[in-house]
Amino acid sequence: MNEKELMILKLIRQNPFLSQQEMAEELKMSRPALANIISGLTRQGKIVGRAYILPEENEVICIGGANMDRKFHIKGKAQLGTSNPAAVTQSIGGVTRNIAENLGRLGHHVSLLTGAGKDSDWNAIKEASASYMNVSNVEQFQNASTGSYTAVLDEQGEMLLAVANMDVYDLLVPGLLMKHEAAMSNAACIVMDLNCPKETIESIKELALVRQIPFVLIPVSSPKMDRMPKDLNGVTWFICNRDEAETYLDSAITSEEDWKKAVQALLEKGAENVVITAGSKGVYAASKDLPVKSYAAIQIDHVEDVTGAGDAFVGALLHSWILQEPFAENIQNGLMNAAKTLQSAFTVRPELSANKLKNELEE
């Protein structure tokens, strides 16, 4: 065993009723990193009792995609039917995983529930994520590959082709996730994207409704809107873009009035809070108690990379909401984090923290 494992076992022997947070503070490490080590000790049989582990109050449980994203940048003119010289970049992605990292960097206790293969891609995702979220409850499948997204770009950065391998998420059936029912029942909220099967989304939404757990639903693309539940009753926050709203509502959004009608229609389907993002125009948002209003995007002087900006918006909005800040502040937190992420080369900006975001909003 390594030094950290020995220190954890020593603490547990001294007081088996310590919470994970108390142990993490004592050892000066993040709670998700500690949870991952404890999970390993349990598998090794070094820990057999569970007296010290109680359901984690105020934990945010994130269910959905955790992918390996690759971009191939072709050198010169693209030619079909032959090999093209290219440079490749690789990053960790997935809507839910990105939101989870934003929340983790903002100081929240986060647990990721997803499906993955037993492969090098998952090992890389786990290594990059474990400092910001608990990844010990991820379901790994022997005969499946970790989710991946691959894009081929021309010299100008325009997409020529993209392929996505997301079959592993189809294995996240309701019965599998319900193993984590106790943890979900004690969560501050459940965040879920549409990578999961429709019946799983319906099942978790109903659990949240019955147990009165705040439930956040995030689409991932227009084609996957056919996985939406039949209504939005029990959905605390529904956050989508224009294409996704148009697909779900079967109605075009072109005018200012269309935007407002779309938000209102989503509220009428049962959601408590609705946001439709409008890119550089900002967002349109409302709650059951507040009228539809447009919120302008924060102006920036350049865009480094659009990847992850939407997930940054969701993460910071939920951070503000969990802190019980007013609705308008929830939106402004999201807009600020999105703007700063657009100016970053990283999918989740590494300098993000609760204090950093607060200072940026006050500038």
Image (spheres, helix red, strand yellow):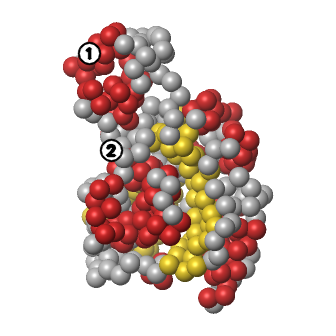
Q: Is residue 169 left or right of residue 212?
A: left
* Residue type pointed to by label 2: Ala
Number of residues whose C-alpha sits closer than 10 Å to that of mark 2, classed few (under 14), some (14–19) or many (20 or more): some
* Whether residue 327 can be seen here: yes
Looking at the image, is mark 1 or mark 2 nearer the viewer? Answer: 1
The picture places residue 99, in percent across and down from the top left corner, at 45, 54
* Residue at left offset 48%, top offset 15%: 51
Number of residues whose C-alpha sits closer than 10 Å to that of mark 1, classed few (under 14), some (14–19) or many (20 or more): few
Q: Is residue 140 above or below residue 217?
A: above
Q: Which of pointers 1 and 2 lies earlier in the amino acid sequence?
A: 1
The picture places residue 82, in percent across and down from the top left corner, at 38, 68
Q: Residue tagged by mark 2?
A: 128
Q: Which secondary structure, mark 2?
A: helix
| Gap in angstroms between the C-alphas marked 1 and 2 | 24 Å
The picture places residue 269, in percent across and down from the top left corner, at 76, 64
Q: Is residue 201 above or below residue 345?
A: above
Q: Nearer the viewer, residue 247 or 292?
A: 292
The picture places residue 100, in percent across and down from the top left corner, at 44, 49
Q: Residue tagged by mark 1?
A: 6
Locate the N terminus and report the quarter of the image it occupies: top left
* Residue type pointed to by label 1: Leu
Query: Which of the 4 image quadrants contains residue 2?
Result: top left
